[in-house]
Image: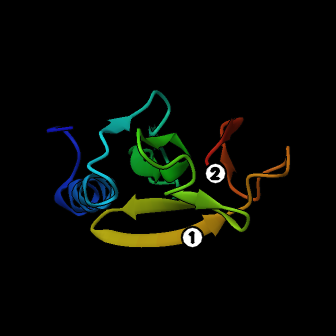
Amino acid sequence: MSELPAQLQEKVKQAQQSCSDFENGEFALEWGAVARVDLDGDLRPDWVLNEASFACSSAVSLYCGTGGCMSHFLVGDVLASRCCQTNSNQSQFTAKGRNLC
C-alpha cells in the first residue's frame, strides 16, 4: 500500500477504520483493488482504486451495497469517485479491455 498516492492511501485508511469500528473487523485489500491505466490519453498510467476488492471480516457488504461499489480515479492530482454498478456484466468504465468498476 505504500506505493499508493496519498489521496488513495487515505481512502484505504478510512476503509480500514470502518472495518475495525464494526465489531473489530480485519480489513483486507484483495487482488484487483488497484489498477494502473491511462485514463486521460497522456500515455502515463493513472490510478484506479476499486472498493469491490475491499474486504472486512465482520461485514460482508460494508463497502458495496445494492447500488454498487465506489471506485476512485486519480488522474494527475485530481481524485474523482463514482459508484459503479456491480450487478451488471458490462461496466461503463473500461480502459484497454479492463473493467475499472
Residue where numbered disc 2 is placed: 101
Q: Could you say which quadrant of the image residue 75 lies in?
A: bottom left
Q: How far from the left and from the top, in percent, is residue 17?
A: 23, 58
Depth check: 94 or 50 in front? 50
Q: Disc 2, disc 1: CB below 8 Å?
A: yes
Residue 55 on image: x %, y %? 45, 41
Residue type of the residue flagged with mark 1: Arg
Position of residue 36 measured from the top left corner of the image (x, y, whole percent)? 43, 39
Identify which residue is drawn at 73% across, 64% down: 66
Residue matched to label 1:
82
Name the residue rendered at 43%, 50% in the picture. 49
Residue occupying image coordinates x 39% and y 49%: 47
Looking at the image, residue 82 sits to the left or right of residue 97; the answer is: left
Q: Residue at coordinates 45% horizontally, 50% vertically from top-left?
A: 48
Asked which colour scheme the image uses, the reply is rainbow
* Kind of element beneath mark 2: loop
Q: Residues within 10 Å of mark 1 (few under 14, many from 20)?
A: few
Q: Is residue 71 above or below residue 52?
A: below
Q: Amino acid at mark 2?
A: Cys
Q: CA distance from mark 2 to mark 1?
A: 9 Å
Q: Nearer the viewer, residue 74 or 90?
A: 90
Residue 101's x, y, as percent?
63, 51
Q: Which mark is residue 43?
A: none
Q: Name, please, the residue furthest toward the top.
A: 31
Secondary structure type for disc 1: strand
